[in-house]
Image (cartoon, helix red, strand yellow):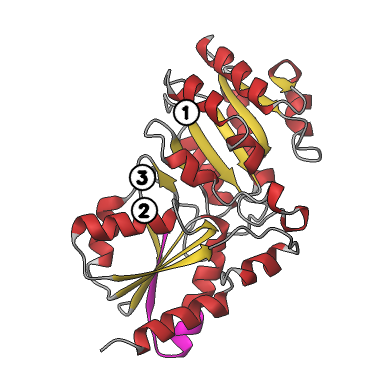
Amino acid sequence: MRNEFVDELGALAAADERVVLLTGDLGFMVLEDFQRQFPDRFFNVGVAEQNMVGMATGLAEAGFVPFVYSIATFATLRPYEFIRNGPILHRLPVRVVGVGGGFDYGHNGITHLALEDYAVMRTQPGMTTIAPADAPQARAAIQATRDHEGPIYFRVSKRGDALPGLDGRFKLGGLDVVRTGDDAAIISIGSISHEAVAAAAFLAERGIEATVAVVSSFNPDPAEELAELLANVPLALTVEAHYVNGGLGSFVAEVIAEAGLACRLLRAGATSMPSGETGTQAHMERQSGLDAGSLATSVQQALSLRP
């Protein structure tokens, strides 16, 4: 997804001279084409993410649309105060691009695992937060927000293969249903949505039909659409490569509570800091119960316990 994202960013830059790209000494083998095409609009600021956001804030005040690119933890957590007091406070069009959300950098350990990034971003009402599920949706998200006046956080995964049923759709604040069923709903965000779709296929083999819906943005978010969907199912499972608190699971819990729905909620995601353990992305996701088999089993067991 990150390659396609940067490719689409290049197309945007070709059409809009305001677009500039800043990196914190990252993106090798990804950003070179942009650098070659637009050498005067590419800045490697070094390992100085706070300064990078400060520079982007100044550039935005001068009329540019800066994209700042780094690993998701470094893009959101290290310069958080600068993001809050710069582009958010002043409603400036700074685009923060966090690469490798969730367990994408599994072998690098907890310092590189972005498990709270969009929770932190969505707490700021002025920060639009977007986590595409696949590369086509990432491309669509860039184009759909090209004239967005305020700041945006893009969470961009390494994985980019197309999500079945999504067809590259993106609507800011919208909910995208990629599979329908009346027995349960699986609500997912980001590239882990592939496991949600696979879990629904497993459930169908066991006679359980589940809706799969993708949330791709907060601030705005699809609260009303989601409430309508959850009003018609007895059980919902949220799926996110993120801590279960503060992110998608918390958002769906808020919707259920505020709408007074009878839908039961299960949350799949990281429940504790995986310190002292590293492994592949797939291994780390399995450890948090985010693989398709674990998700399907959770739904099946919960439905079997219904009175």
CA separation, marks 3 and 2?
Answer: 13 Å
Name the residue: 38% across, 76% down: 210
Q: Earlier in the sequence, mark 3 or mark 1?
A: 1
Question: Is residue 206 inside the magenta stretch?
Answer: yes
Look at the numbered disc 1 and give the secondary structure of its residue: loop
Question: Which numbered disc, 3 or 1, marks the residue closer to the eye?
Answer: 1
Look at the numbered disc 3 and give the secondary structure of its residue: loop
Q: Nearer the viewer, residue 130 or 48?
A: 48
Residue bearing the label numbered 1: 151
Instruction: List x then y, in percent, for residue 214.
Output: 43, 58
Instruction: List x then y, in percent, for residue 74.
Output: 66, 37
Q: Which mark is residue 173?
A: 3
Q: Which mark is residue 251?
A: 2
- Residue 230 in the figure: left or right of residue 217: left
CA separation, marks 2 and 1?
Answer: 21 Å
Farthest residue in the left direction?
Answer: 260
Q: Earlier in the sequence, mark 3 or mark 2?
A: 3
| Quadrant where the image shows the C terminus | bottom left
